[in-house]
């Protein structure tokens, strides 16, 4: 398997926040999973370190990022700055088709919540923010939003007070309504309030949650990659 492909698989694993923070990613272990040399894995890990998707610790190796709540505040602040700008831009520029797409998304979120489908609801509520970034049509905004959102997903997984308390469905609906009505000020306020509320729902936990193993998560993502499930646009 080529470096590019290994990089794509690991990037998806790390951005999805599916591994607990501070976990060591052993070169030897990954080399076995991918069926490649340790040198090839080492190159990819260094690249991921340079991209700030991993912590490279001298003489100790690669570790998943372990965001703490203080760092979390900085990340949420960055999200408020970026996403309130996105909301302002979208309120002025959304096409009727895009508004319709957003409406369907918010409805799907509400439906998943109504059915008690926690997993789908959590996925959709994170995707709401990815979708807004995508609708700006600006690849730089999209890339930065994706990085920030992924960082907060890691925080939510570690610190949320109760399962699924991350994004309020009504808050997403309020953002959507303001955007659909093209009310710029309201949309900015709804987004800022929402992200502040999400942040206040995080609480430090006393013990580390038990996460899935590196092997399980990487192997699963590798299988998706090989089955071609990953859309081309996301593969890089
Ligand atoms: Zn949200």
Image (cartoon, rainbow, N blue to C red):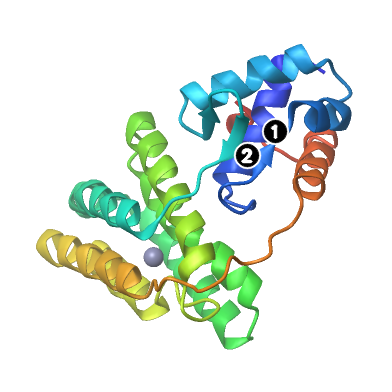
Neighbour tally class for label 1: few under 14, some 14-19, many 20 plus, Cα within 10 Å: many
Query: Element under label 1?
Result: helix
Judge whether 54 appears above or below 15 on screen: above
Q: Please determine whether, in this image, residue 48 is positioned above or below residue 144.
A: above
Q: Residue at x 56, y 50 (%)?
A: 21
Question: Residue 229 falls in which quadrant of the image?
Answer: top right
Q: Is mark 1 within 8 Å of ligand 1?
A: no
Q: Position of residue 180 (x, y in %)?
A: 27, 64
- The residue nearer to you, when weighing 180 against 62, is 62
Residue 218 in picture, x, y percent from top left:
76, 41
Residue 226, how many percent across, how many down?
84, 33
What is the secondary structure assignment of the residue under circle 2? helix
Q: Residue at x 61, y 54 (%)?
A: 20
The residue beneath circle 1 is 9
Please indicate whether residue 79 sits to the left or right of residue 59 in the image: left
Q: Which residue is mark 2?
A: 12
Ligand 1 shows up in the quarter that is bottom left
Residue furthest out toward the left? 185
Mark 2: few, some, or many residues within 10 Å (few <14, many ≥20)? Answer: some
Can residue 220 be spotted in the picture? yes
Quadrant of residue 231 in the image? top right
Please tell me in which quadrant of the rendered image residue 196 appears.
bottom left
Q: Residue at x 78, y 35 (%)?
A: 225
Quadrant, the C terminus: top right
Using residue 79 as the reference point, say whether residue 51 is left or right of it.
right
76 vs 122, nearest the viewer? 76
Residue 121, numbered label: none
Residue 181 visible somewhere in the drawing:
no
Q: Quadrant of the N terminus?
A: top right
Q: Say if mark 1 contacts mark 2, CB within 8 Å.
A: yes
Q: Is residue 35 left or right of residue 27?
A: right
């Amino acid at each position: 398997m080529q470096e590019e492909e290994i990089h794509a698989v690991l990037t998806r694993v790390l951005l999805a926040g599916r591994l607990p923070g501070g976990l060591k990613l052993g070169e030897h272990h990954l080399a076995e999973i991918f069926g490649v040399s340790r040198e090839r894995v080492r190159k990819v890990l260094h690249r991921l370190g340079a991209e700030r998707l991993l912590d490279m610790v001298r003489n100790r190796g690669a570790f998943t990022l372990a965001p703490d709540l203080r760092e979390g505040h900085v990340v949420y602040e960055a999200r408020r700055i970026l996403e309130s700008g996105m909301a302002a831009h979208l309120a002025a520029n959304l096409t009727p088709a895009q508004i319709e797409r957003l409406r369907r998304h918010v409805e799907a979120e509400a439906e998943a919540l109504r059915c008690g489908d926690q997993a789908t609801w959590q996925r959709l509520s994170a995707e709401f923010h990815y979708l807004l970034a995508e609708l700006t049509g600006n690849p730089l905004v999209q890339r930065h939003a994706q990085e920030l959102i992924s960082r907060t997903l890691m925080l939510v997984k570690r610190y949320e007070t109760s399962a699924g308390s991350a994004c309020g469905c009504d808050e997403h609906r309020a953002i959507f309504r303001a955007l659909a009505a093209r009310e710029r000020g309201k949309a900015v306020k709804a987004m800022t309030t929402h992200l502040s509320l999400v942040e206040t729902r995080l609480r430090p936990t006393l013990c580390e949650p038990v996460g899935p193993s590196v092997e399980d998560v990487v192997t699963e993502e590798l299988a998706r990659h090989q089955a071609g499930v990953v859309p081309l646009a996301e593969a890089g």
